[in-house]
Amino acid sequence: MKVLVVGSGGREHALVEALAASPLEPEMYAAPGNPGIARIAQTVDIPVDDLVSLRDYAANNGIDLTVVGPETPLIGGISEAFWEADLKVFGPSRAAARIEGSKVFAKELMRHAGVPTARFEAFDTEAAALAYLRAHSDYPVVVKADGAAAGKGVTVASSRDEAEEAVRASFGGKFGAAGERLVIEECLEGREASVFVVTDGQDILPFLPAQDYKRAYDGDEGPNTGGMGSYSPIMWMEPATYAAILEDIIRPTIHQLALIGAPYTGLLYAGVMVTETGPKALEFNCRFGDPETQVILPRLGSDLLELMVTAGNEDLAGREVVWSADKAVCVVLASEGYPESSSSGDEISGLENIPAGVYVYHAATEEREGRFYTAGGRVLNVVGTGPTIIEARARAYAAVEQIHFEGMHYRTDIALEAIELEDL
Ligand code: AMP
Ligand code: GLY
C-alpha cells in the first residue's frame, strides 16, 4: 500500500511516523515533506497548494491513500480533485472544510445546530460593524476575520477603541479577501482545549484531548504564535466535560454538516473553552492540530492507517481507539525573531543520540551534506513521553538542552501546570 502525506511541518512528520508504523507496512511518500520526514518517506517536491500536480502524482504513482496535513489545500478543494480522479483522500470536501475556511459559516452552522458557543453577530461592511460596536457596552469582545488568516485574524479587544481598530484593519485589507467579512463575538473565559475526532460523516472516533500553548513566552505572555508547545492527556478535564464536548459540540456539528449536504469526512478539530457554564466551541479546524498531533500520535496504540482506511469506507461504527498509558509533552524550538520574523540557515547541533522515549519532529529545517540548518520560525518539536507528565516533561527538556542553534528560544513552562495537577 502506498500512502502520501501532504505537508511539511512537525505535524506531518508525526503523521508520517505513525502511518509508517502500521502493520500494513505502507510505502510512505510526502509532498513536499522535510529533512526529518525524508528519513522515513520518499519526499516529492510539490507544494501543498498545487492541487493538480498532487493529484497527477498520486494517479501516476499508484498512491492508495493521501492524508492532507494543512488546511489550505482542503479549503481549496483537494479532496474533490482527488475523488474526481477516483483517488482516496483522508480529509473533508471543500464544502465541509468551510467550517475552518469561514468563521461566519461556522458560527451560523453552530447556531442552527444548537451548539454552545459565544454569542455573535456577522458583518459584511465596516460601517455596520462600527455601528454595532458603538451601541455595544460590554467589553472585551472578540473580532474575527471571516476567512483563513494564518492564525492572525482573531483579536481579543479589551476596549471599544481596540475593537474598532481591528474592524478597520480587517476591512482595510490587512487579511486580504479573508477580512472582507467578520464576526464580532462575546469573549469567553475559561480553559482552552483541543479535541480531535476522526469521522466518516456519521460516526465518530474520539481522540484524547490535548493542551496547546499559543503565546510566545512563559506565563502566556507575548504575541500569539502557531503554537509553542503542547501536552496530552489533559488532567484538568473531567470525563463528564469531555463527554459533553462530544455530545453537545462535535456530534451536532457533524450531523448539521450532513443535513446541509456537506458531510464531513476526515479529522475534525474542535477548539473549546471550558467555562463555568460548560464547554463552548471557539472554533473548528478541518485538520489535525499542530503541535497537538505531536503529543497525540506517539500515544496512539491503534493503527492510524487502518483507522483512516476504515473512516474512508464509512465503517467506523463500533470502533474504538486504544491509547498507551504514557503521557507526552512537546516543546517547540523557535528561531531568532519568531513570531514577528524568523531566521534561517543556522546550523543545528545535538540531533544525534536522541534518547529512547523522545521524538524530535522537524518543522522547519534544511539538510545540506548531512548537516541540518534552520529554515523558518518553528524549527523543531521535541516530544518527551513517559508514564507521568513529570517524566515526559523531564525527558523533553533534557533533550532540548542537548540541541542547539544560534538564536534558539523556547518556553520553559510547557506542562508545568499539569505536574501540579498530577500531584493532587
Ligand atoms: P480561533 O482561531 O477562533 O481559535 O481564535 C484563536 C484564539 O483566540 C483562540 O484559541 C482563543 O485563545 C482566542 N479566542 C477566540 N475566540 C474567543 C472567544 N470568544 N473568547 C475568548 N477567546 C477567544
Ligand atoms: N494548535 C492550533 C492549530 O493547529 O490551529
Image: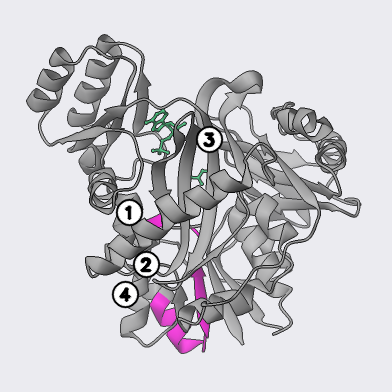
Check disc 4 and report the residue beneath it.
80
Q: Position of residue 222 (x, y in %)?
A: 54, 19
The residue at label 3 has a CB less than 8 Å from ligand 1: yes
Is 140 rendered above or below residue 1? above
Do residues under tags 3 and 2 come within 8 Å of each other at their CB atoms?
no
Give the residue type at disc 4.
Glu
Earlier residue among tags 4 and 3 = 4
Check disc 2 and report the residue beneath it.
264
In which image quadrant can residue 144 be found?
top left
Do residues under tags 4 and 3 come within 8 Å of each other at their CB atoms?
no
Instruction: Say whether residue 35 is visible.
Output: no
Check disc 3 and report the residue beneath it.
192
Q: Callout 3: few (<14), some (14-19), or many (20+) C-alpha neighbours within 10 Å?
A: many
Q: Does residue 71 show up magenta in the picture? A: yes
Do residues under tags 2 and 1 come within 8 Å of each other at their CB atoms?
yes
Is 117 rendered above or below residue 326? above
Disc 3, SS: strand
Disc 2, SS: loop
Give the residue type at disc 1.
Ile
Earlier residue among tags 4 and 1 = 4
Q: Which residues are magenta?
A: 55-72
Give the residue type at disc 2.
Tyr
Q: CA distance from mark 3 to mark 1?
A: 19 Å
Q: CA distance from mark 2 to mark 1?
A: 10 Å
Give the residue type at disc 3.
Glu
Q: Callout 2: few (<14), some (14-19), or many (20+) C-alpha neighbours within 10 Å?
A: many
Label at residue 99: 1
Earlier residue among tags 3 and 2 = 3
Q: CA distance from mark 4 to mark 2?
A: 13 Å
